[in-house]
Image: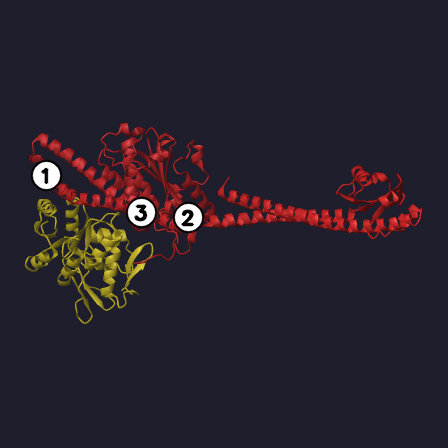
Chain colours: A red, B yellow
């Protein structure tokens, strides 16, 4: 049971117990008091009547029934006279069976006056029976008082009290819910803050002045935790950034010196030439890795600046592929670039430097693990979901896809059917990527099952992670799926540039 | 092509390796370790291109750049450890013509230097004087002057940018075209170079740089010069 439910239950149970015990107490007190009052009144009346009976019998009156009928019976009561073992009653319907046996014997043989109260009498109705012995005339006078009016009063009282109890219990539950909501509200604040922090907004804090004094401890320890977390993350990001920065100076020296050596390499003996070759290849790889690490640490520290320019998508992709293939060196097969006619004239807002890296990394990845890129296609994002029909399951970017679907649903094809998202796909002829690996390939330094296939090993292990990061910064998405040919199909999307008043400098 | 290069870099090893690499490319290199030394040396030794590291002890690279720019139109390349907008734009606004990020490839650096050393060549044939507003542009003499004859000082890169725009008045030139023609960059050159230089140029040729009348931005396309 949750804490809220528990608080509610405690309030409800408390209200129930309290209201019913208070109600019970009131009921029994009232009943006791009312009965005592009625008994006193009944006894007074019975003694008065017995005195009248005594006088009349002593005076020689033998018309007992008439006598009994004339007696004062202010309250609804019936009189029974037992005279020398004969029973007379008024009205006639009343018999001596109305008198409980023990009372009768107590009065007749014991000779003492007695009162007995029945909430439920011998005939089921509440009554008070008062018996007064009149030994001087060998008689006993009994008077039976009906309590049905009192019973009714008590019933009404009882019902009222039970009703009040129920209402109080319900109120208790409502109050409990309110109290639990109220007391859990600060926790909702904590939860929101935690979500914000998990989402990367590390400057989120709980407002100390708004906090309950009782929760001050929680607030301050939460904020302290976030402070330390933030400090730690910043320290780590700074460390990464510092390391990469510090590596730049020696790398600059190394690469400049290496170029001097390379310019002179034909004067070197063959063994030294080979060594220089190895040195050069790995130095360049190292240089790329440091560049990638810096890029990553900047992204982690949130200190990236994206310089979006509006460019023609066809030209962009064509140029990026050319540049990417150039950096791959000779010998790589140039992939076919297929640009759908409906996107040829469209513009996208991109950071060209980042897009160049994206394309270079995808081509590099295809060359290292997929036997080289075969087709690069540029089209509007397929909304009909033909990717499902190719049998691919998109584990790659489930959340991204949902969001994308939402965005397309909202924006939709414009009135003039202008597409809003462009898809750029790089297909390779490799073995493809299994479902389980499709998200992992975008992890940093992930070495998949294909890593054994690494030939010359020029990857930095950060390429695809950076692809995802760069594309994200340009408001696009990245995923991988199966190409119709069976290879991998890496897809990046970019939103179509919408011309509005932007910055101008 | 030979040229005299001034390298301002505090790290001794980087300085030596840069000297070796640039000398290998055929340049005549002088190197100093601080901005102050650079200004001293610059006063005496003729320099064609200055390479200034941003992170220098004492006077920093930006300051050195501004000081140099106050006395000369010499092409300046800043060497930065970061390609952040802040450093790059601050460097360009301090008067630099171009930038490279560490670790750089010496060949790439040599190419940047070559591009800056190229003579202004607005078009294939010499167009003679170009005029717009109350300004007169003489590409072959490298002179921009007002109608009354006062010369407007601008850097070589600014001048070349202006020549490119003025050579085809009313025609939009894209950032990529300008990057290629003025800086020798390919398609993926940094558009911020163009933007900052245009802004700088406007402060020199426009009456109100915030409301340009001659050098206009064409959104999504590039820039054009309206005489």
Q: Earlier in the sequence, mark 2 or mark 1?
A: 2
Q: Are marks 1 and 3 in contact (CB under 8 Å)?
A: no
Closer-to-camera residue (B36/A265) = B36
Q: Chain of mark 1?
A: A
Residue occupied by mark 3: A228
The residue that appears at 11% across and 33% down in the rendered structure is A273
Task: Answer with mark 3 or mark 2, whichever residue precedes in sequence.
Answer: 2
Question: How many residues crowd around disc 1 within 10 Å: few (fewer than 14), some, or many (20 or more)?
Answer: some
How crowded pointer 2 is (Cα within 10 Å; few <14, some 14-19, many 20+) is rated as some
Q: CA distance from mark 3 to mark 2?
A: 17 Å
What residue did someone put label 1 on? A261
Image quadrant holding the C terminus of chain B, namely bottom left
The chain carrying label 2 is A
Q: Residue at x 10, y 30 (%)?
A: A271
Residue B48 falls in image quadrant = bottom left
Q: Are marks 3 and 2 on the same chain?
A: yes
Same chain under badges 1 and 3? The reply is: yes
Q: Position of residue A297 (x, y in %)?
A: 27, 44
Helix, strand or loop at disc 3? helix
Q: Which mark is residue A190?
A: 2
Q: Secondary structure at mark 1?
A: helix
Q: Are marks 2 and 1 in contact (CB under 8 Å)?
A: no
Answer left or right for A107 relative to B121. right
Front: mark 2 or 1? 2
């Amino acid at each position: 049971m949750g804490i809220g439910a528990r608080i509610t239950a405690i309030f409800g149970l408390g209200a129930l117990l309290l209201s019913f015990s208070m109600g019970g107490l009131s009921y029994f007190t009232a009943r006791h008091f009312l009965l005592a009052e009625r008994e006193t009144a009944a006894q007074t009346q019975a003694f008065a009547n017995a005195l009248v009976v005594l006088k009349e019998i002593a005076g020689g009156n033998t018309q007992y029934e008439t006598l009994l009928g004339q007696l004062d019976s202010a309250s609804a009561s019936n009189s029974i006279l037992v005279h020398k073992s004969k029973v007379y009653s008024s009205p006639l319907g009343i018999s001596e069976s109305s008198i409980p046996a023990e009372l009768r014997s107590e009065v007749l043989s014991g000779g003492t006056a007695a009162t007995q109260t029945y909430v439920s009498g011998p005939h089921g109705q509440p009554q008070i029976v008062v018996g007064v012995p009149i030994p001087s005339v060998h008689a006993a006078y009994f008077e039976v008082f009906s309590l049905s009016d009192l019973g009714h009063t008590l019933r009404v009282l009882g019902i009222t009290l039970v009703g009040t109890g129920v209402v109080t219990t319900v109120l208790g539950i409502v109050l409990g819910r309110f109290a639990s909501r109220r007391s859990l509200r600060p926790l909702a604040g904590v939860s929101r803050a935690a979500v914000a922090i998990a989402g990367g907004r590390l400057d989120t804090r709980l407002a100390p002045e708004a906090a309950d004094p009782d929760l001050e401890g929680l607030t301050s320890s939460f904020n302290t935790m976030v402070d330390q977390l933030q400090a730690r993350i910043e320290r780590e990001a700074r460390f990464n950034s510092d390391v990469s920065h510090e590596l730049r100076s020696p790398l600059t020296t190394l690469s400049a010196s290496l170029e001097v050596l390379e310019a002179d390499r034909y004067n070197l003996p063959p063994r030294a030439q080979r060594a220089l070759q190895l040195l050069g290849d790995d130095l360049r790889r190292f240089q790329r890795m440091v560049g990638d690490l810096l890029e990553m640490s900047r992204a982690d520290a949130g200190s990236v600046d994206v310089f979006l320019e509006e460019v023609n998508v066809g030209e962009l992709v064509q140029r990026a592929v050319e540049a990417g293939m150039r950096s791959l060196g000779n010998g790589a097969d140039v992939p076919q670039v297929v640009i759908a006619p409906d996107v040829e004239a469209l513009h996208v807002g991109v950071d060209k430097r980042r897009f160049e890296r994206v394309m270079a990394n995808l081509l590099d990845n295809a060359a290292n693990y997929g036997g080289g890129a075969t087709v690069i296609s540029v089209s509007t994002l397929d909304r009909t979901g033909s990717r499902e029909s190719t049998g691919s399951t998109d584990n790659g970017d489930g959340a991204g896809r949902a969001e994308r679907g939402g965005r397309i649903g909202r924006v939709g094809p414009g009135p003039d059917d202008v597409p809003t998202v462009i898809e750029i796909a790089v297909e390779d002829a490799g073995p493809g990527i299994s479902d389980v690996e499709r998200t992992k390939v975008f992890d940093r330094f992930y070495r998949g099952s294909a890593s054994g296939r690494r030939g010359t090993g020029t990857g930095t292990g950060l390429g695809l992670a950076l692809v995802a990061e760069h594309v994200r910064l340009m408001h696009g998405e990245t995923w991988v799926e199966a190409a119709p040919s069976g290879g991998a199909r890496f897809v990046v999307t970019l939103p179509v540039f919408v011309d509005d008043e932007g910055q101008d400098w | 092509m030979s040229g005299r290069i001034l390298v301002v870099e505090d790290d001794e090893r980087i300085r030596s390796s840069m000297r070796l690499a640039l000398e290998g490319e055929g340049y005549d290199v002088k190197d100093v370790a601080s901005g102050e030394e650079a200004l001293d040396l610059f006063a005496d030794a003729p320099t064609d291109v200055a390479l200034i590291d941003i992170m220098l002890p004492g006077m920093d690279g930006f300051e050195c750049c501004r000081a140099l720019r106050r006395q000369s139109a010499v092409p300046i390349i800043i060497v930065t450890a970061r390609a952040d907008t802040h450093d790059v734009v601050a460097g360009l606004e301090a008067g630099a013509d171009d930038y490279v990020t560490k670790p750089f490839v010496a060949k790439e650096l040599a190419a940047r230097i070559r591009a800056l050393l190229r003579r202004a060549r607005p078009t294939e044939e010499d167009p003679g004087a170009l005029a717009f507003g109350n300004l007169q542009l003489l590409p072959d003499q490298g002179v921009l002057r007002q109608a009354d004859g006062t010369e407007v000082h601008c850097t070589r890169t600014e001048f070349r940018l202006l020549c490119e725009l003025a050579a085809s008045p009313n025609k939009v030139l894209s950032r990529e075209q300008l990057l290629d023609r003025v800086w020798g960059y390919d398609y993926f050159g940094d558009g911020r170079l163009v933007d900052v230089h245009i802004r700088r140029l406007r402060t020199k040729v426009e009456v109100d740089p915030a409301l340009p009348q001659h050098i206009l931005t064409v959104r999504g396309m590039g820039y054009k010069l309206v005489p």
